[in-house]
Image (spheres, rainbow, N blue to C red):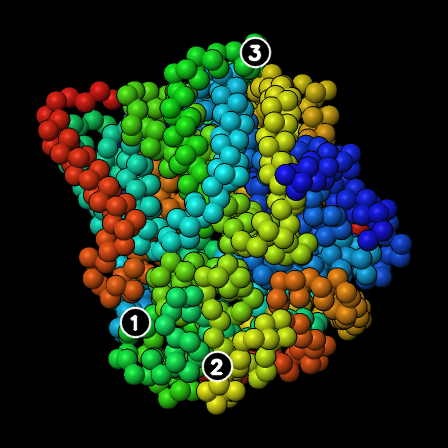
Amino acid sequence: MVPTRRRTLLAAAITGGGLATPALAQGRYPSRPVQLIVPWGAGGGTDATARIVGSLLERDLGQPVNVVNRTGGSGVVGHSAIATAPPDGHTIGMITVEIAMMHWQGLTELKPTSYTPIGLVNQDPPGVQVAQNAPYADIRALAEAIKSRPAGTFRASGTGQGGIWHLALVGWLQAMGLRGDHVRWVPSNGAAPAMQELAAGGVDIVSCSVPEARAMLDAGRARSLAIMAPERNPQFAQVPTLNETLGINYSTGAWRGIAGPRNLPAPVVARLGEALKRAYDSNEYKEFMASRGFGTVWRDAEGFASFMAESDRGMGEAMRAAGLARG
Amino acid sequence: MRLHDAALGGLLLGLAAWIWWLTGFFPAFPGQDYGPSLFPRVLGSGIALCGALLLLRGLREGGPVLQVEEWARDPVRLLSFLAVPGAVLLYILLSDWVGFIPLAFVLLLGLTLWFRARPVVALPVAAGVTLAVHWFFAGMMRVPLPRGWLDAVL
Amino acid sequence: MEAILQAFALVFDPAVLGVILISAVFGLFVGAMPGLTATMATALLVPVTFFMDPVPALGAIVTATAMAIFAGDIPGAMLRMPGTPASAAYADESYAMTRRGLLNLNMGVNLVFSVAGGLIGIAVLVLCAPLLAEVAINFSSFEYFWLACLGLTCAVFLSNADPVKGVLSLLIGLLLATVGIDPSAGVPRFTFGEVELMQGVNFVATMIGMFAVSELLRGAVTVRGSGGAVVEQVGDVFRGLGAVWRRYWFNFLRGSGIGTLIGALPGAGADIAAWISYAVSKRFSREKEKFGTGHVEGVVDATAANNSALASAWIPALVFGIPGDSITAIVIGVLYMKGMNPGPTVFLENPQLIYAVFLIFILANLLLLPLGWAAIKGARQVLRTPRNLLLPVILLFCVVGSFAMTNSLYGVSLMLAMGLFGWFLEQHGIPVAPLILGLVLGEMLEQTFVQNMIKADGDWLEFFSRPIAGALGVATLAIWVLMVGRAVAGGRAPKAQVA
């Protein structure tokens, strides 16, 4: 890091968020600060990812990129704010896997096609975490124990009812030939409180992603037995996949990407896409995501659209099968 | 303005009934005994109980149903009272279109003048406060205050 | 020892000290502005810290948050509008002190006991972080449920009003907390199809409405007639503190102790710490009837509690990497970025950095004395302003502050509705403080209740099956029995009521 840049950035943030940038070419995009809406609160993984992406985009676009948290309603409020913004590229947002789930639950009308995709930047598969002192040496022992005990013996947590990690658990149980409610789901207000419950002995399994569980894993309070992904995560290379241990080919995951409201002009999408790609390729982004243990995946606008369509279809099927879809 | 306790109690009973009725539309889940309607119903019952107590107590005490203070009969003071929610309402309705800076300035100026500040003082105060608030909240803290008419200038 | 010397060298570097000073001023401003929270200050500092070394990066966050938590007391006392959620519990009491002409004493108490409470939190953080972290991490939904119950029980003591109206206010607050997505099945409740209502009722916007706007409504009626300043006060902020200290030193220790414990719990931060310690102060006070009328006792407890909670939230964060509040949740991300992976090993691998953080904590709290004093002096000019100018300006702050809480006009609409509703309630002798507490604790209460019932499969005995949960539960029930017993015994005797 060059010291001068460090100082200017500090000065910029302290004195006015870099508002000093003159509008060099009026009419060219972006001509004023860009809002990056985050449907989740400060302190969480989506907020952290959005803030690093935002600060890298800001450097590239030459206009301030302001991260704006629009929280609550299980993500509906923020997703709706992105979808209903004027489609001029000055309001974009980070959309998350919930957009492929909430409409199946009847929480909102919004679905992936309500947005103009710009790029996918992250994906994290669910893991299977147990407390450190749990009597299961590996995922096989846990799976045997779940199958041999009557329904309702085990308790799991990770999100609210019908959230992504609930769905992951249901999918795994069904892949093992069990009913989706064989393990009792304890709704929680996110992965962190669920991991706290796990460490305190309140639940037996937490099916959140490994990076979300990382604090408790590093603290020696919990163990990750497997991840539900096609291959291992290089950040957590010691954690096996379900396929290699149980022979179950089940994988799903939470993802995050940048998108704007529907009907964003093509030049704006192109400009943002380039900037986002450069941000994605930068060392800062790679280092940051690695330091948090978050997975990095890239899909451009077109790839992101088909990725979301696929995710939407898969989630719909899974939720109907699990009895979580409504309407 | 003050309702009699008995009338207040009656209102609360109505509120509790309305809440109970609304909870009837919440979906129930098989195998889930502690559903979305449990807590609101418990709270609604509590409110109904408080309402009933107030109603009984109020009926025993007696008194006028509605007491109106002196200021509410004076049109000027009543207007002063209404100016506060009125200004907020105007902000809610107009801020997206007009933008923070012009609207906040006009509202500040209007209110200070209505409260009989001298224009020589009111003008610079309204302008200075508007700009300072905009600088700190929008510039430094990156709160997305609406840009409105000044969109091209900012 | 060598690590401590290294830490001194790291902290007492001109550039680092400069960063600390700038972030101190920044924190004071953020804290004093209603609607801007210490968490927001931290989130905004993160992109800046990307480009800093670990010590100035953490120093900026530590300093800014410590300043912000104190500064939130200033508008609470002067305008009945808490600057941060952590000051909400005693904003009403502080404002009552101001109206009695005790603004100087209130500000002095807030400043000095904030500093002292912060130092106690740091002392615990330095001396017995691992021990306390071990207790905190064993809190499950059962313990949190009883904690919420205990807090709500205290709410009944929060007001001196008619008990029926106090309970009614609490119930309305709990009911408002059920608006939004429900914690058991994830369905929207009482949203009437409005997307914005799905985020629930924001408690800061509600407070700004119920406390500040309702106060403006009352003031607007008389402002054209008077036009003069609210209160004219001269004198020394530090005068009279010795007497307060001699009289209430135990309150200070108790407040700091409760604050430290609650701060160390993952998921409960400085705001909950202030509420509970204020309520405890009232429960065990010999002069309960003075609470709410501008009595300094509860302020001592609560202002010490929120600052000590701020420091102790770092205990689980540093020892386990588990955040104690939303600020440390962001801090943990910064720690990872700086290669200081939190956990027991960080004390072995980077002891000089950890000592440096401790040093900055102490430094920031000491710096709070002169800077806080200057902030009070500056802010006091506000009250000299004629009311016909002050009232519209406060209204603008209410609007912008509640907008900033939700980043949308929903916050402003909520503030307006709650302002009128709060005015209506106070007109009818219904206190608003229990309502706010119900709104704050409602979600925790319902969420943990549902979790407990699912986990226990409906068996109530499980609520007492864990040692800490059992003790908390028995304590709560004992208080209820005592309360009912006393009400029955004293029911016939006329009660002294202070409106």
The count of marks equals: 3
Tag 3: residue type? Asp
Q: Position of residue C176 (x, y in %)?
A: 37, 48
Q: Is residue C384 left or right of residue C246?
A: right
Residue drawn at 19 percent across, 22 percent down: C495
Q: Chain of mark 1?
A: B
Residue drawn at 70 percent across, 77 percent down: A299
Query: Residue beneath label 3, please?
Result: C236
Residue drawn at 26 percent across, 80 percent down: A150
Secondary structure under badge 2? helix
Q: Quadrant of the N terminus of chain C?
A: top right
Residue furthest to the front in view is C1
Query: Residue beneath label 1, please?
Result: B29
Q: Chain of mark 2?
A: A
Residue furthest to the top in view is C235
Secondary structure under badge 1? loop
Residue drawn at 42 percent across, 83 percent down: A140
* Along the line of sight, the residue nearer the viewer: A207 or A117: A207
Secondary structure under badge 3? loop
| Disc number for residue A316 | 2
Tag 1: residue type? Phe
Question: Alpha carbon of mark 2 to alpha carbon of mark 1: how far?
Answer: 19 Å
Task: Let me know if marks 2 and 1 both belong to one chain.
Answer: no
- Residue A193, visible in the rendered structure: yes
Q: Position of residue A157 (x, y in %)?
A: 40, 67
Task: Let me know if marks 1 and 3 both belong to one chain.
Answer: no
